Each structure stands twice: as structure tokens, then as C-alpha cells.
Image (cartoon, helix red, strand yellow):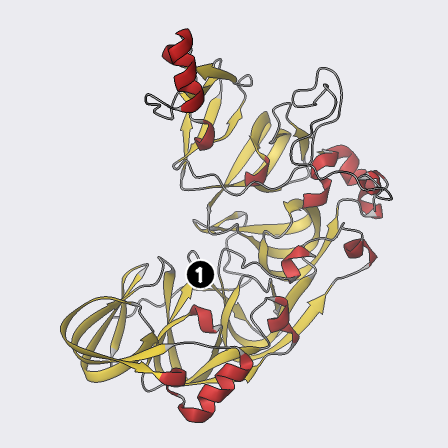
Amino acid sequence: MAQFRLHSAKVLAVTMNGDAVKAKNGSMVAYDGQMAFKKLSGGGEGLRGMVTRRLTGEQMTLMEVKGQGTCYFADRAADINLVQLDGETLHVEASNLLATDSGLRTGTSFTGLRGASQGNGLFTTTVEGTGQAALMSDGTAVVLRVAQGMPLQVDPGAYIAHQGNLRQDFQTGVNFRTLMGEGSGESFQIRFEGDGLVYVQPSERNTLGGEV
Amino acid sequence: MTTAPQVLDVTTLPSNDNVNSYTFCVDLDGQWFLQKGKMIAYYGQIDFNGVGHGHLDRLVATSFHSPLHAGEWVVAEGNGKMLLADRAFDVNSYDLEDGNLTVRSGNLLAFEPSLSLKQSIIPGFVTLIGTGKFVAASNGEVHFVEPPVRVDPQALVGWADCPSPCHHYDHGYLKGVLGGIRAMTGIGGASGEEHQFEFVGAGTVLIQSTEVLMAEQATGAVPHEAGVPGGGQHGGGQGGQSPQMPGQLGNLQRRFGL
């Protein structure tokens, strides 16, 4: 199985021994050894996945990297976070996914209103199986645990991923003041309940929700 | 080898301290002022209300004295831990003890209500007076220097305790007609460093380690009044403000707390 490690906070090094990883198209910065790069149309999810991604707007262009040696990945100096999955499902925004072990399955799932508020569409990418994945964040990500009786509220613009058995609710505080331009600017939040981990980045994407 | 990221929860998050260089955790029990959109996540029961909100009147009367910034600030109220961050810039907290500190208004993220926020007479800056904690962002690390010092305008974050700065222009660029042309047009070579802010007196000056400013947020304009810097006495000319449309309230709604 490919070995993921952080070469630095912003460079991912993957050591491969004849096996493969899936990575964001064009994110390779250097490699040693023998590597072959192959573009995966539709994220390697087959024709059905390709159509789903096109329809849902959760597009990502992935490549498959296969070979012997170490391959280095980076993207626009974003910080990188490693996630170890043991049969769980990781939900992540397609734009925040850098690389996954080829043993992990990727797909799309419906997120409901949350996606609409962060300008990311109504769908999110899921990664499931056993292996490692690398996420990107603008600045060092903070990993927060959600447990029973300890719900977490997250700004939609700062959310990047979550894993575990979590229920998400969209909560709004839109009222008459928001319409008068005196909103709190924190009117939209995603509320996570259950058991799991949530990844947030110290930066907010420009969102529709951020304006109100 | 895998470096597993540290997983934090409500008990392991630091209390009123940095989580990492870009994120600050406020242990909220009561009220804090924060700039809109700087909260990234929170545990607990916290409400966010614009400063115009009715029941905050008393708090606003003691701690918030800048109608210009009323639209950008909210009060977080409740119990819990709240994470603050701003566009992946470095954030730091500062403690004031019966002191005063002036900071670029866009760089201030949050402050305790024991401090009081006032508009500085330098446009675009706000002054915090009193005792308490506040959180400010900078592009790169903050460095502290003591006056006398001249600072590049873009690198200035703020200053504490010392008198407000004045402009300083290099003499060579003021001398003679050629010097004037050079200063105005850059023809003949301008280093881009002919103009600085000069600080004198006792205090501390805060500078950031880049000349790239964070995007300024519209902070309104100072009142039209004689003697107010930037007040535009000569027939208006409030740069940056959109023209008043008939039927608009002219920001009057803010004064009524709407």
C-alpha cells in the first residue's frame, strides 16, 4: 500500500512500491524513481460517476500515479492534512481533496442546503474504504471532535471535511435585521451532532451565506 | 510514517489562546465583540447579534463608540468555545492593561467588552482603550519596535501608547522641480520608499512582515465637520462612498439600532 507522509506542511510525499494513488490532476511537483501518470476521466468512477459528477457540479479531475519510488504533491501552497480511514466514510469538498490511496472509493453524495450556502453546490465528495487520503486547507486545519452531548457549529465557508457518524443540520439565524443590512454575518451555520471529526480551515471561502 | 493531526474537542481546546498560528480560541462566558465572518466554528450555546440589537444597548454604550464600524461588528453572547480566524493570516492576542492601542480596523478580529473601541482620528484605524484582551490579524508575523522609528505605510499594523504618527517624506524628493516631478511621477527613479510614517515618543509600534495589506473593508467615512481629518470640508468628496439615492435612509437606520 502506498505510504503517505508530509514532507513539509505543504508538500505531500507518497512512497509507492508498484502500487497506485489517485491525485488531483497536475498536482505532482517532483518524483524520484519510475512513475507513470494517467488521467482518470470522471475521477475514475466509471461512466456513471462521470455523469453524476457532471450533473452535480462536484467535478474533480484526477490522475492515477503508479510506479516505484517517491512522488511529491502540492497545490497552490495549500496546507495538507493526512486522514487515515479504516472503513469509514470521509465527506470532503472536491476542491479540498489532494490525493487518495487507490484502494479508496470516491463518490458523490447529496448534502442538502449546506452546500448551497457555501457556493459549493448541493453535493459533496465521499471517500470510503481503508487507506490514507490527503486534504488541502487554506492555513493549518483544525480537527475538532464531535461527541454525544457536544455538538459543534461550523461556518460553512470554513468547513472542509468530516468523517464518522455525524448528523448535520443547517441552522439559520436570518431575521428582519439581516434584511436591513444589520445581520450578524454569522447567520448560517452547520450543526454537527453524533460521533466523529470535523476539519475546519482558518479562512472562509466567499460564500453566499457569509454576506448575510 | 504518518503524523496524525491533533484532534481537539471542547475540553482540549486552549482557553483564550492560539490553537495554531492562524486560529485563536476564545473561552466565552459572557460577551465578546467580533468582526463579522471571523468565527469559523464553536462549541456550546452562542448567539450572534448585530451591535444594533436592542438588548445590547447598555454594552454598546460602554464599549463601542464607532458608528462607522457598527455594520461590521457583532456581539457573541453565551457560553462555549469559539474559534476565530481570518483568511489564513497570522492571529495574535494582546493584553492591554489600562492602556491604549491603535490598529488598522480591518486587522482587528475581536475584543473583550472591558475594552472600549473608538475610531482613531487617523482614518481607517481604531483605538482600543482600557484593560482586557483583543485578537488581531497580521499578514505574516508581527514585530514590535520602539520609537523613534519610521515605518513603511503598508507594513504598519498599529501602535500602542505612543503619540499618533506623522508623515515623513525624504528630502531629496522634495527638492527642486526635478525632485518634485520625480516624486510625483516616478520618472528618474523612485524607490517606492520615499514616504514613511514617523513615530516618536515612548511606546510600541507593531509591524507585519509583508507590505501586502489585507483587503480593506469599507469602514464608512468620518463626519463632515471642520477639524476632522478626512472629513472633506470642501464640498464633500467623500472618497469611496456611493452617492446617496433618494429614498435611502442615509445610514440613519444604524443610529436607531436597526
Residue A191 at what x, y percent from top left?
64, 70
Specify the farthest residue to the left. Answer: A33
Is B111 located above or below residue A135 in the figure? above
Q: Is residue A75 left or right of residue B157?
A: left
> In which quadrant will I find the N terminus of chain A?
bottom left
Q: Residue at x 59, y 25 (%)?
A: B99
> In which quadrant will I find the C terminus of chain A?
bottom right
Res A133 quadrant in image: bottom left
Q: Residue at x 52, y 18 (%)?
A: B165
Q: Nearer the viewer, residue B195 or A105?
A: B195
Q: Chain of mark 1?
A: A
Residue A33 at what x, y percent from top left?
12, 74
Specify the farthest residue to the top. Answer: B176
Residue B47 at what x, y percent from top left?
72, 56
Q: Is residue A38 left or right of residue A62?
A: left
Q: Nearer the viewer, residue B242 or B84?
A: B242
Q: Residue at x 51, y 87 (%)?
A: A52
**Element under label 1?**
loop
Query: What amino acid type is highlighted by mark number 1?
Result: Ala
Q: Is residue B29 left or right of residue A164?
A: right
Res B59 quadrant in image: top right
Is B90 located above or below residue B121 in the figure? below
Residue underneath mark 1? A141
| Residue B149 appears in the rendering | no
Residue B145 at what x, y percent from top left?
41, 25
| Residue B117 appears in the rendering | yes
Q: Nearer the viewer, residue A19 or B94?
A: A19
Crowdedness near tag 1: few (<14), some (14–19) or many (≥20) residues, C-alpha within 10 Å? many
